[in-house]
């Protein structure tokens, strides 16, 4: 699967997670996530070409999840559970795709 | 209660003044004009706006001798202030942006609310109007006694790319070995070329940044990497 598709699915999963619990916050999810996209891509690329070890990437992804959660939660109409679920869904989708392998267009 | 506008007005008066790492600013001296370091600048501005010490030790001592430090900013943020997200701080005039020292050198800046900052940046640049991006921050801080208006949604802040830094567990990989080799070639001893970003590597990065007039934080982001000739993709 290519990175563009993985990303689109990851953002979709985050939006879906927010939809039921905090519908008013859904419109902010994409823009907040997009701000992290390039960094996530760079991290995955660094892992793919062996520049950074897998454990280091795992730790960075954990940190990204926490950052995403705090940014989602900063939306006034967001609730904590929805922010957690959205961050988990986004990073979880990427991690699942990592197992299968992601194609990057560099 | 002081307003964000007052805080920013105080800070702006000191643009272009001199930076010196480890400088001590007497917080109760309104005529002080530097030298500053990042934490001294922010704590001094807070004191001038509110009459209260924040991010200093001793917190209840003489304001002219209270020493400001990013580590104290982190402690006070949790105890007396309010921790907010980086995107929220970037959109809130009068909020602060904090990068914790974490074994290296932290940084703190005042948010203007439009994605820019006022901060005591480095020896080379002094007190400047900077940008929230593309840099690594840990979180935003609201300081008690400063009235701010927090927006309904955070500003989407473009994340920095890869930032090699001292953390636990240690960052490891070929890229770190490349950085260590470049540091050694530049005359800054990173210790063994073991591909682990440990304290000795962080110290060598600080020495390199000082040598090149960069902001000294012990972290390898885009700018430091470029100066080292090690591309972070």
Image (tube, rainbow, N blue to C red):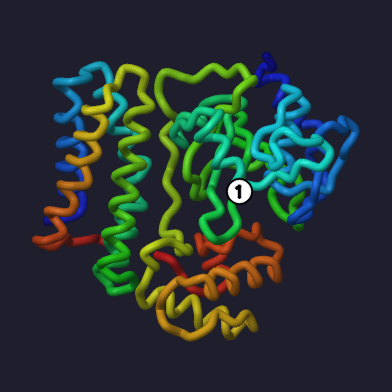
Nearer to the camera, B72 or A46: B72
Identify the image quadrant of the C terminus of chain B. bottom left
Q: Position of residue A94 (x, y in %)?
A: 18, 51
Q: Position of residue A97 (x, y in %)?
A: 13, 55
Q: Quadrant of residue B97?
A: top right
Q: Residue at x 36, y 72 (%)?
A: B172
Nearer to the camera, B84 or B179: B84
Q: Is residue B152 left or right of residue B40?
A: left
Seen in the picture, residue B76 relative to A58 is either above or below; the reply is above
Identify the image quadrant of the N terminus of chain B. top right
Q: Residue at x 71, y 63 (%)?
A: B213
Q: Position of residue A23 (x, y in %)?
A: 21, 18
Seen in the picture, residue B172 relative to B100 is either above or below; the reply is below
Q: Residue at x 43, y 43 (%)?
A: B158
Q: Residue at the far right: name it.
A: B31
Nearer to the camera, A53 or A24: A53
Q: How many marks?
A: 1
Q: Position of residue B149 (x, y in %)?
A: 54, 17
Subunit under mark 1: B
Q: Residue at x 17, y 40 (%)?
A: A89
Residue for badge 1: B107
Q: Residue at the far left: name it.
A: A100
Seen in the picture, residue B152 relative to B17 is either above or below; the reply is above
């Amino acid at each position: 699967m290519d990175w563009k598709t993985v990303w689109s699915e990851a953002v979709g999963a985050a939006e879906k997670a927010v939809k039921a619990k905090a519908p008013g916050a859904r419109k902010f999810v994409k823009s907040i996530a997009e701000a992290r996209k390039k960094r996530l891509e760079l991290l995955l690329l660094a892992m793919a070409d062996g520049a950074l070890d897998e454990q280091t990437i795992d730790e960075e992804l954990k940190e990204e999840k926490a950052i995403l959660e705090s940014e989602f939660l900063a939306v006034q109409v967001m609730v904590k559970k929805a922010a957690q679920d959205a961050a988990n869904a986004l990073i979880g989708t990427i991690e699942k795709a990592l197992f299968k392998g992601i194609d990057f267009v560099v | 209660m002081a307003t964000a506008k007052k805080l920013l007005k105080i800070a702006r008066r000191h643009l272009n003044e001199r930076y010196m790492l480890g400088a001590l600013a007497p917080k109760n001296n309104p005529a002080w004009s530097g030298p500053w370091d990042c934490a001294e600048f922010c704590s001094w501005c807070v004191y001038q706006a509110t009459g209260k010490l924040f991010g200093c030790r001793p917190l209840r001592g003489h304001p002219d001798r209270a020493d400001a430090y990013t580590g104290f900013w982190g402690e006070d943020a949790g105890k007396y202030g309010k921790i907010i997200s980086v995107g929220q701080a970037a959109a809130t005039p009068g909020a602060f942006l904090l990068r914790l020292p974490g074994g290296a050198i932290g940084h703190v800046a005042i948010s203007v609310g439009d994605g820019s900052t006022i901060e005591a940046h480095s020896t080379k640049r002094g007190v400047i109007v900077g940008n929230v991006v593309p840099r690594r921050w840990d979180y935003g801080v609201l300081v008690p006694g400063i009235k701010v208006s927090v927006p309904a949604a955070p500003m989407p802040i473009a994340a920095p790319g890869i930032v090699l830094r001292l953390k636990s567990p240690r960052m490891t990989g070929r890229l770190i070995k490349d950085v260590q080799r470049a540091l050694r070639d530049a005359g800054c001893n990173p210790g063994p070329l073991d591909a682990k970003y440990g304290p000795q590597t962080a110290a060598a990065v600080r020495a390199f940044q000082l040598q090149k007039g960069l902001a000294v934080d012990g972290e390898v982001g885009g700018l430091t990497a470029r100066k080292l000739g090690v591309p972070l993709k």
